[in-house]
């Protein structure tokens, strides 16, 4: 059963942002839903032990990752390909540092999860934006423009499923990306953290890095953090089949990036072993929430939106001039905390998190409707 509860006074980054205001926080990408009961049980067992020293990543954790990819994608990954991380943002920063240190350029679609852009700017990497396009209610890529910018040894930076937007690459789109990377002898970073949250059951998912043409030029990122609502436990991994690329990556993070946390390791192991049934319940819950959001938004004038195929996040374009303080400030005045699209590369839009309780979502949708009525006149 999927349960939700108040997260006030729990040091929640999401909720404490508005701790003294009547604003429903629907911004940062974690859910207001309790994690699986089996995690509570395994944590209680470890807490009873009451010792929390330095922790190794156990071999059986790699074994479960290998089983996961074999079962889900028929991809036979090898033990040495897996690199454990505290989170995936560190990997995104590491790749940008690798690119900057080697004078490799980057091609970054937008809108995109902010750390992709923030890390490129931080390391003063040479990068080009390519605006995504909306086709048939989905976000997709401007492949012709990417092909012009993608040069030998350049990095193409992707999130699949998209964040924001929630669109999942279809087979035709995958083939175009793989062909471009292969033809240009480029590199690919594929952040797949939301790939276990595909809401539409008829949509298949395949990791781009599985393709033999580009397997040695791809870094694939994944974590249980989003699916099982455990981002605060700090655990994720990269899959890097190329020994040369893997060595570069390890040298880049050496001494800077810490190991995953003890409870992150325990949680990830349990989620990989026991999580399928709970995840299926979660997907039904999120599908119902998404459909409720889509139903309400479809009746509101002067917006357009992408109904997400995956994730618990919906991308909404407001068809009015952007206020001086941005859309985040505007919607805060009506009691909703959203992610401002300018952080993703599109100031005209907002991202709204529907991974919350039914009561919170109903309140938020009423407030959103009032905010749009106010501006629509």
Image (spheres, grey):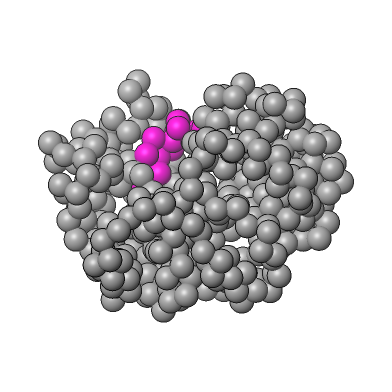
**Residue 246 rendering spot, x and y as whole percentages:** 70, 47
Q: Can residue 83 be seen in this view?
A: yes
**Residue 292 rendering spot, x and y as whole percentages:** 33, 63
* Residue at 62% from the left image edge and 69% from the top image edge: 66
* Residue at 46% from the left image edge and 51% from the top image edge: 260
Q: Is residue 374 visible?
A: no
Q: Would you place residue 346 above or below residue 245 in this image?
A: above
Horizontally, residue 199 falls left or right of residue 284, namely right
Horizontally, residue 57 falls left or right of residue 303, namely right
Q: Is residue 349 magenta?
A: yes
Horizontally, residue 230 falls left or right of residue 196, namely left
Between residue 135 and residue 159, name the one nearer to us.
159
Between residue 365 and residue 45, name the one nearer to us.
45
Between residue 44 and residue 206, name the one nearer to us.
44
Task: Give the residue at the far right of this rendering.
Answer: 183
* Residue at 77% from the left image edge and 45% from the top image edge: 244
Which span of residues is magenta-colored? 339-353
């Amino acid at each position: 059963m999927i349960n939700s509860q108040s997260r006030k006074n729990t040091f929640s980054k999401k909720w404490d942002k508005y701790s003294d205001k009547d604003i429903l926080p629907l911004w940062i990408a974690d859910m207001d839903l309790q994690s699986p009961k089996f995690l509570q049980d395994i944590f209680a067992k470890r807490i009873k032990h009451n010792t929390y020293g330095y922790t190794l990543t156990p071999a059986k954790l790699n074994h479960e990752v290998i089983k996961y990819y074999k079962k889900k994608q028929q991809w036979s990954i090898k033990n040495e390909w897996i690199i454990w991380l505290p989170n995936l943002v560190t990997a995104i920063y590491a790749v940008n540092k690798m690119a900057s240190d080697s004078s490799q350029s980057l091609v970054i679609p937008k809108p995109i999860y902010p750390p992709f852009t923030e890390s490129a700017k931080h390391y003063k990497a040479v990068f080009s934006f390519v605006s995504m396009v909306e086709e048939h209610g989905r976000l997709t890529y401007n492949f012709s423009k990417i092909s012009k910018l993608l040069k030998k040894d350049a990095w193409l930076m992707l999130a699949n499923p998209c964040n924001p937007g929630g669109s999942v690459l279809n087979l035709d789109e995958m083939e175009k990306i793989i062909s471009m990377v292969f033809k240009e002898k480029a590199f690919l970073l594929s952040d797949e953290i939301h790939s276990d949250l595909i809401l539409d059951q008829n949509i298949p998912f395949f990791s781009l890095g599985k393709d033999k043409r580009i397997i040695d030029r791809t870094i694939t990122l994944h974590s249980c953090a989003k699916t099982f609502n455990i981002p605060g436990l700090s655990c994720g991994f990269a899959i890097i089949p190329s020994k040369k690329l893997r060595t570069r990556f390890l040298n880049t993070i050496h001494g800077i990036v810490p190991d995953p946390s003890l409870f992150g390791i325990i949680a990830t192991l349990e989620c990989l072993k026991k999580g399928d049934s709970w995840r299926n319940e979660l997907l039904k819950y999120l599908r119902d929430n998404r459909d409720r959001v889509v139903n309400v938004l479809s009746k509101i004038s002067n917006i357009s939106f992408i109904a997400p195929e995956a994730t618990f996040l919906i991308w909404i374009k407001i068809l009015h001039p952007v206020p001086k303080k941005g859309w985040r400030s505007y919607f805060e005045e009506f009691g909703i905390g959203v992610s401002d699209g300018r952080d993703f590369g599109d100031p005209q839009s907002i991202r709204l998190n529907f991974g919350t309780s039914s009561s919170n979502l109903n309140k938020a949708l009423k407030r959103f409707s009032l905010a749009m009525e106010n501006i629509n006149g």
